[in-house]
Amino acid sequence: MDEERDLVVFEDDAGNELTMEVLDYLSYEGKEYALLTEYVENDDDEGDEDEPVEVFIMEVRPVGEDQEEFVPVDEDLAETLIHIFESDDFDDVFEDDEDEE
């Protein structure tokens, strides 16, 4: 099963690269957000499935015609967005925001 993944590469101040996988997107209050986790290239190396996965939420801002910038959000907003991502109403919230555009 070879599915296409939405990957984003970040670079820190020291020039180290970190590849993150976008798990999902969400429109909330007129802005777009992404739920990301560290990308693991080989699924066999993922380890214990019961191990918690660290996730990050970032605002997605368009830059130019075909690029995006991922910007960290504050802790309170991240908590709100995580609750939306985890809720059973996620699809309804996402569809409502798309209808408003």
Image: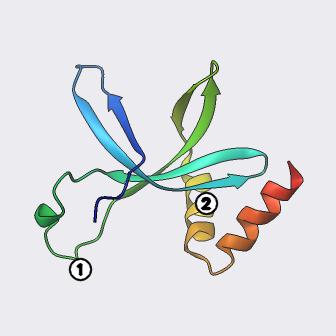
Q: Residue at x 33, y 60 (%)?
A: 54
Lateral position of residue 65 relative to residue 17, left or right: right
Q: Which image quadrant is residue 86 in?
A: bottom right
Query: Marks 2/1: CA distance?
Result: 23 Å
Lateral position of residue 11 relative to residue 41, left or right: right
Lateral position of residue 17 relative to residue 28, left or right: left
**Relative depth, front residue between 7 and 53:** 7
Label 1 sits on residue: 50
Vertical placement of 17 versus 15: above or below?
below
Residue farthest front in this picture: 1
Q: Are marks 2 and 1 in contact (CB under 8 Å)?
A: no
Kind of residue indicated by mark 1? Asp
Kind of residue indicated by mark 2? Leu
Vertical placement of 22 versus 70: above or below?
below
Vertical placement of 44 versus 67: above or below?
below
| The N terminus sits in image quarter | bottom left
Label 2 sits on residue: 81
* Badge 2: residue crowd in 10 Å (few <14, some 14–19, many ≥20): many
Q: Residue at x 59, y 70 (%)?
A: 83
* Badge 1: residue crowd in 10 Å (few <14, some 14–19, many ≥20): few
Point out which mark residue 36 bears.
Answer: none
Is disc 1 placed on a helix, strand or loop?
Answer: loop
